[in-house]
Image: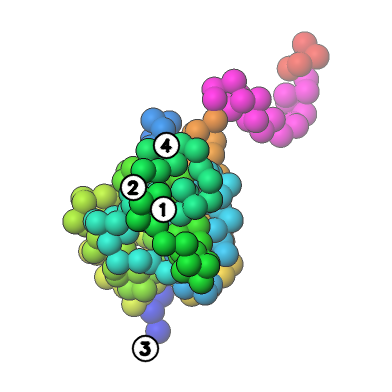
Amino acid sequence: MIHIIDVRETIRGLLRARKYLQKVASTGGLVLFVGTKRQASDTIDQQATRCGMPFVSDRWLGGTLTTSAPFAAGSLAWRAGSPAIQRRVGDVFQKNAVFDEPRISEDDRNLNGMRMMNRLPECLVVIDPRKEKNAIGEAKSWASPLWALIDTDCDPDEVDLPIPGNDDSIRSIELIVQLLADAWRRAAMPPARRSRSRPKAPWSPAASTAQRN
């Protein structure tokens, strides 16, 4: 059976997601990028880092949003020497942390992108909801809005805003996530920098004549 994705719906979903992310960025909110499948992992890592946003690109740990997020993220940041988190949870971890090198290495892989998540995110950007069903379930329990790149084997009703597309293609994932990251970065810029970074209008004979007059 052949499934065909309507590209017009992809564009509509992408535009709605960009608009929402820009709104969240302009108010200083957090977005959690999630993509642990092999095709998405590197892109999620790179683009979330560009935005300075938390991400999960290796493995979703159960309870990340429901039970252990502040403690797991705080533990990793404390071990990495983050002064802000160390002040907040230092007493707890000084008494209870067990410094086991293999465990620290595993934590670093699984929680590396969570270091800057000091509160629950305003929304999640997910690649392949079927693969990330645990993340979807936890986000729903907190009523966190979900924006997802979904293929024809996913249920669009599982997320708030589906972006229909190929979630198995590295190029497709790169394109969608980069566009969302670009929208985030632009909205998060100070107004002065935003105006300086605005692209110049393309040259045209009419514009050139108007300038001379």
| Residue at x 21% of width, y 50% of height | 143
Name the element at disc 3: loop
Q: Quadrant of residue 152?
A: bottom left
Name the element at disc 4: helix
Instruction: Kindly check if marks 3 and 4 are in contact, taking CB atoms under 8 A apart as contact.
Output: no
Instruction: Kindly check if marks 2 and 4 are in contact, taking CB atoms under 8 A apart as contact.
Output: no
- Mark 3 and mark 1: span between their CA atoms? 48 Å
For marks 3 and 4, the one nearer the N-term is 3
Disc 3 versus disc 4: nearer the observer: 4
- Mark 4 surroundings within 10 Å by alpha-carbon count, few (fewer than 14), some (14 through 19), many (20 or more): few
State the extent of the magenta-drawn residues as a range: 190-209
- Mark 3 and mark 2: span between their CA atoms? 56 Å
Judge whether residue 199 is colored magenta.
yes
Instruction: Return the x and y of residue 134 as percentages of the image width and height.
Output: 29, 68
- Mark 2 and mark 4: span between their CA atoms? 10 Å
Q: Is residue 144 left or right of residue 1?
A: left
The residue beneath circle 3 is 1
Name the image quarter holding the N terminus: bottom left
